């Protein structure tokens, strides 16, 4: 062990004689604070990212975690925009040799890409608002002209009636009917064209909604969306279906006798069952527009866009069969699980709570009639 110099020894003795004030941080620990802070910022940034064209939220989270480990411990840094490099047997690099420039470039480029994505999505929303405003302004102007035409014909019809001339009345009645019919047909055609245009824009925004799902809304155990995300997305999807006319379906899944599974195998065994069930849901509902959520406890929900009632029933049956066919091995024991499923298709007068209430009612009907079955809500 090397000996301390006289100056260093005196400084050490003085420090030992005078304890550090409460709340201060030792010098060695203070040196690590910037690295710890930067790693924490990166992890928060990664865990709260959202999907953009250049990278989805999961990839961002993995990259930020890899960068955090690199700057804290000197493990290998991520390689470009792909998956993080696997740890190797190489020694950790010193702080001065860590890839600070690459980290700055990664963060800057991704923030610029996020900004572009946000601006693009904002322009889509503004475009829809502008289109609606333009349509309303055009409709008001056009309606004023048409109303003036109808008013003139009604006034002429009134004059014809006052003249007591049957021929004049017949002629004017015919002309008035023709003008009114023309106005009605023109308005109907315009409204239908506007509705088609808005429906297309709404479809685009619906797809954008799917892309903007935040990872922060994931259930930590099953890695599907949580109850809060479900409530928000269901309300938006019901509004979009009202505007676009697209079909919408809701499936509620409740695992049968799940308490017995927890009592027999413990909560870790129950967690394995929940994760296995999610694998079935992801396999049966693989589209990006298929929204899967853990509704609470052992209950799950699936929102399906562009699925008619007949197809909705088929999806429910596939989920039922998939869960029933699970073979779950846990601590040298096999766990069997079944489910009860309730389904409902969107009706034009539905609010989000109406669709949920009907699906939930069908779920309870499935449970009360013997479980391990799927039931479609009545219209």
Image: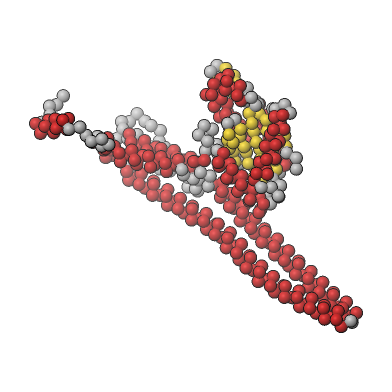
Residue with the most extreme right position? 166
Taking the image as drawn, is residue 289 in sight?
Answer: no
Q: Quadrant of residue 100?
A: top left
User: Number of numbered discs present?
Assistant: 0
Task: Indicate the quadrant containing the N terminus: top left, top right, bottom left or bottom right.
Answer: top left
Point 63% across, 55% down: residue: 200
Residue 152 location (% of width, % of height): 76, 78
Q: How is the image coloured?
A: secondary structure
Residue 227 location (% of width, % of height): 57, 39
Q: Nearer the viewer, residue 330 or 238?
A: 238
Classify 1 as above or below 77: above
Q: Nearer the viewer, residue 235 or 281?
A: 235
Classify 156 as above or below 342: below
Residue 115 location (% of width, % of height): 45, 53
Point 82% across, 81% down: residue: 159
* Position of residue 293 in the picture relative to residue 92 (left or right): right
Point 70% across, 36% down: residue: 361
Q: Nearer the viewer, residue 163 or 313?
A: 163
Residue with the most extreme left position? 6
Point 25% across, 35% down: residue: 22
* Position of residue 17 in the picture relative to residue 303 (left or right): left
Taking the image as drawn, is residue 127 in sight?
Answer: yes
Residue with the most extreme front position? 22
Q: Quadrant of residue 132?
A: bottom right
Residue 92 location (% of width, % of height): 31, 32
Q: Quadrant of residue 274?
A: top right
Task: Indicate the quadrant containing the C terminus: top left, top right, bottom left or bottom right.
Answer: top right
């Amino acid at each position: 062990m090397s000996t301390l110099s006289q100056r260093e020894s005196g400084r050490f003795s003085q420090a030992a004689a005078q304890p550090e004030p409460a709340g201060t941080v030792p010098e060695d620990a203070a040196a690590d604070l910037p690295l710890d802070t930067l790693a924490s910022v990166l992890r928060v940034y990664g865990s709260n990212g959202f999907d953009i064209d250049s990278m989805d939220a999961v990839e961002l989270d993995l990259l930020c975690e890899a960068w955090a480990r690199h700057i804290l411990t000197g493990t290998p840094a991520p390689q470009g925009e792909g998956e993080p490099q696997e740890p190797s047997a190489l020694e950790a690099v010193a702080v001065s040799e860590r890839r600070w420039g690459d980290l700055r470039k990664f963060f800057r480029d991704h923030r610029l890409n996020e900004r572009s994505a946000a601006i693009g999505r904002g322009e889509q929303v503004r475009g829809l608002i502008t289109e609606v405003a333009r349509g309303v302004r055009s409709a008001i102007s056009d309606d004023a002209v048409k109303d003036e035409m109808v008013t003139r014909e009604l006034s002429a019809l009134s004059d014809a009636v006052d003249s007591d001339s049957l021929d004049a009345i017949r002629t004017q009645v015919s002309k008035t009917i023709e003008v009114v019919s023309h106005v009605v047909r023109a308005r109907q055609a315009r409204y239908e064209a506007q509705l088609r245009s808005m429906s297309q824009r709404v479809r685009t925004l619906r797809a954008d909604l799917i892309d903007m799902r935040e990872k922060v809304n994931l259930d930590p155990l099953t890695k599907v969306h949580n109850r809060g995300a479900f409530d928000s997305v269901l309300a938006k999807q019901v509004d979009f279906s009202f505007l676009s006319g697209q079909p919408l379906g809701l499936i509620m899944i409740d695992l049968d006798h799940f308490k017995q599974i927890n009592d027999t195998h413990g909560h870790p065994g129950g967690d394995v069952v929940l994760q296995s069930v999610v694998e079935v849901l992801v396999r049966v509902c693989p589209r990006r527009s298929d929204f899967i959520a853990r509704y609470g406890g052992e209950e799950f929900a699936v929102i399906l866009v562009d699925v008619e009632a007949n197809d909705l029933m088929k999806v429910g049956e596939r989920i039922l069969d998939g869960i029933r066919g699970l073979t779950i091995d846990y601590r040298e024991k096999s766990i069997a699980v079944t489910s009860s499923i309730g389904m409902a298709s969107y009706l034009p007068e539905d609010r989000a709570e109406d669709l949920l209430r009907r699906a939930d009612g069908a779920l309870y009907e499935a449970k009360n009639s013997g479980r391990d079955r799927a039931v479609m809500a009545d219209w």
